[in-house]
Every structure is written in structure tokens, then in C-alpha cells.
Amino acid sequence: MKEEPKKTELTKAEQELFEELMPEDLNEIIETGINRRHFMKLMSMAAGGILINHLLGAEQALARPLNLPAELLPGSIENGVEVSFKVNDISKKLTVDSRMTLLDTLRERLQLTGSKKGCDHGQCGACTVIIDDQRVLSCLTLAASCEGRTVKTIEGLANGNELHPLQMSFLKHDGFQCGFCTPGQICSAVALIKEAKEGHVSYVTEDVRKRLSSSKLSDEEIRERMSGNICRCGAYPNIIAAIREVNSGKQAEQNWEFAG
């Protein structure tokens, strides 16, 4: 007996949102869920300020996983290869297009959307993840090349409800504004501290023959080692302070004060 597809249960806020702004799509959303077309419509409305009266419904709708179109299902993937790897300590096995990047695999196939697609050319660092304890640009890394490897994304840094020390430090020092680059910044910083402890030198290291004291990284060293991660909001002083505090284990002076 063929099982009937389960209909999407909308919250009251979502129901009001779609009834008023996307009535022509309401039945489709209930029957099949939110797809990319619906998502892009919502994003365009958000850009135009149209969602201002439906903030709760929009937040709930945009947080839902997208209903994958048929062309992304394993049976219809062109040039498909099977890849097995660990993501945030969970074993994953899936079929992907041999040309699919790790970034697209994380976001579109595994619903791990913390890693951001900024430039998609390896120039901004927003997509930075950690593979086998080394930071990589996931937009330039093929998913097929990750066979047997261990991938850590921003979603896997916290231990349950306990944030990673760098996540807490970024919050403390206000190391972000729009937050788009933050997942890549934090993943890069986690790897940076490990690299420094292992004695890796950088372009600005004064004496490459002398073992680097990882706990005494200068601001110049941190800036150089984080130079591949761009913050368009310009929160660099706060980012450096957040990294310095975790790396040194000493309280770093905050670069801002509460008004009043």
C-alpha cells in the first residue's frame, strides 16, 4: 500500500504570512513543503522590507529545511560518486556529483548552513571549515576528495549547549556585526591556535629558526594568520581581541563600552 505524502503543518504565523503575501503558493507549500523558489521569494520580500509585519512567520519559514528537488536525489545525479566521511563526529555516506563542492554538499545535502557562500572563489573565507584539523576553503574543495576524512563545521564546535571558548570570546568582544563571515572566522581561528601551538610560522614571524611561543602571538601575527578571512563590517579589532584572549588565556581589553 502506497503511503500518502505527509503534508506540511504550518504555524499560525506562517499561515498568515503565506496567505497574505504568497497565496498562490500556499497549497503547494502545504502539499510539498518549502522549496528554493519559495525561499527566494521570501528573501526578495525581506530585501524589500515587505516582511516587516510578519517577522515571526518569516523567521519560522526560513528556518525550515528546503524540500530537495528531484534533480538532487541520488538516483538522478549525473557523474555520481559515493563518498563516506565524518561531519561533526557523525559518519555520513552519500552520493554526490563528482564536481560538487564540499560547501554545496554541506549546505544543500546535509542542511548544515552555518558555512556561508560569500564569493564562491576562495577569496573571502566565509566558507572556512576544518578538515583533519586543518582549515580549508570548502568552496574550493570537492566533496569527493573528503573520502575517509573528518570535517568540522561551525555547528560542531560547541559541546551540546556549551559553546566553544572562541564562540564565547567572539560574543564577549562583539567580534561580529552582520555575522555572515563569523562561522568562517571562528573555524579559521580554531585552526590558527592549533597551528601556532605546533610551531607553524607565518610571513611576519621574526625568527623562523626559533620555536614560536604560541601563547604570545602578537596582534600582527594574528592579523596575518587571519588575513584570508574578510569581514566586510570591519570588526577586525574585536576579532583580534577575541582570538588573543583565548590563545593567551589572559583577559583581553574590550574595545567597546555599553552606552549610558
Image (cartoon, helix red, strand yellow):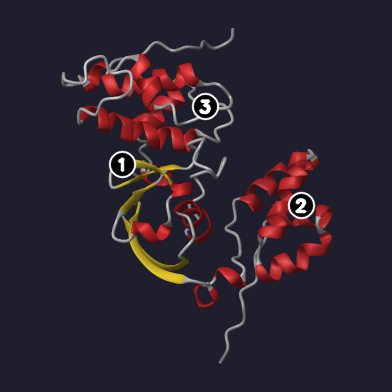
> For this rendering, which residue is in front, 109 or 258?
109
Tell us which disc is closer to us: 3 or 2: 3
Residue designated by label 3: 176
Labels 1 and 2: the sequence-earlier one: 2
Labels 1 and 3: the sequence-earlier one: 1
Question: Percent position (x, y) of residue 125?
Answer: 48, 36
Q: Quadrant of residue 67?
A: bottom right
Tell us which disc is closer to us: 1 or 3: 1
Residue farthest bottom in this picture: 1
Image side of residue 166 versus residue 195, left or right: right
Question: Percent position (x, y) of residue 213?
Answer: 20, 19
Question: Please, what secondary structure does the residue beneath circle 1 have?
Answer: strand
Question: Please, what secondary structure does the residue beneath circle 2 have?
Answer: helix
Image side of residue 66 versus residue 204, left or right: right
Residue in the image at 74% along x and 42% along y: 46
Instruction: Please tell me the numbered disc located at residue 23.
Output: none
Labels 3 and 2: the sequence-earlier one: 2
Question: Please, what secondary structure does the residue beneath circle 3 have?
Answer: loop
Q: Disc 3 marks which amino acid?
A: Phe
Image side of residue 10 versus residue 225, left or right: right
Residue in the image at 46% along x and 66% along y: 96
Residue designated by label 1: 134
Asked if disc 3 and disc 2 are in contact, CB closer than 8 Å, the reply is no
Query: Crowdedness of circle 3 by 10 Å Cα count: few (<14), some, many (20+)?
Result: many
Residue designated by label 2: 17
Q: Relative to residue 17, is residue 72 depicted above or below?
A: below
Question: Percent position (x, y) of residue 217?
Answer: 29, 18
